[in-house]
Amino acid sequence: MHRLPPVSSMPYRRILTGVSMALAFLLPASLHAADAREIARTVCAACHGVDGNSSEPANPKLAGMDQEYLMRQLKAFAEGKRRDDTMSAIIASLDSGDFAKLATYYGSQKPTPGTVRDPQLAAKGLALFEDGNTDSGVPACAGCHQSDGQGNARFPRLAGQHQAYVLKQLADYKSGRRATDPLMTTVGKRLSIDEARALAEYIAGL
């Protein structure tokens, strides 16, 4: 009998490596979603809810937000461009690879509607949201956030957002504590307290 010539293991290693990489790309999206949901449950849920619909008025609803916008905000916290003691500590505990998972997960969740407590105040907010205030130079919110408040990659979804959270963000823009968007800094400085309250009330009902 003739002995077969020795076969190098290198080609087989290459084949196995290629197969492994292919399988990694073929992992179902449900596995990635499950991973993100677990991070949301263990890290984010206490403030934002597992599905991104926070029950605490001071904490924003994340459900339905544009994924690119969410990614940018997570990076802003990580880089210190946005400041919040709780968020900064939580972001530090996450791997940067988790940002995309969380943004995709929360962006795909169904947002719950907000509640209007003062219809008359909300009516004043509607006028500001759609038309702005030409006297003080406040632009219409609808121009950037869309008429239905759904937002986009640059500007966040506002529809149904908590009044308390909206008021806090407008106050932070006014004071300069939040300085991630020059346009919103200008808006915050030009809005009166009464106008901010009216907008927050209207936004909650969108």
Image (cartoon, helix red, strand yellow):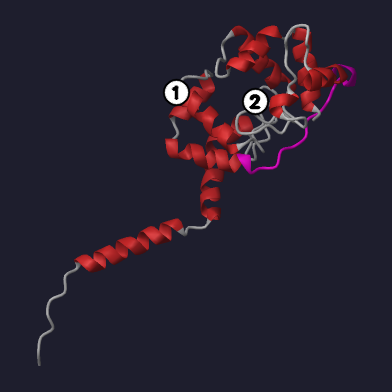
Report the number of numbered marks: 2
- Which residue is drawn at the image coordinates 87% and 20% (left, top)? 123
Q: Nearer the viewer, residue 187 or 32?
A: 187
Is the residue under label 1 in contact with that under label 2 (CB below 8 Å)? Answer: no
Quarter of the image with the N terminus is bottom left
Instruction: Decide if residue 55 is in sight here.
Output: yes
The amino acid pointed to by label 1 is Glu
Q: Which residue is mark 1?
A: 79
Mark 2 burial class by Cα count in 10 Å: few <14, some 14-19, many 20+ = some
Give the SS element for disc 2: loop
Q: Which residue is mark 2?
A: 59
The extreme left residue here reads 2
Label 2 to label 1, Cα distance in Å?
21 Å
Left/right placement of residue 198 relative to residue 182 reads right
**Residue 76 picture location, percent across and down:** 50, 24
- Magenta span of residues: 107-121
- Which residue is drawn at the image coordinates 42% and 61% (left, top)? 23
The extreme bottom residue here reads 1
- Which residue is drawn at the image coordinates 52% and 42% (left, top)? 101
- Which residue is drawn at the image coordinates 16% and 70% (left, top)? 8
Is 120 magenta? The answer is: yes
The amino acid pointed to by label 2 is Asn
Q: Earlier along the polypeptide chain: callout 2 or callout 1? A: 2
**Residue 73 picture location, percent across and down:** 54, 28
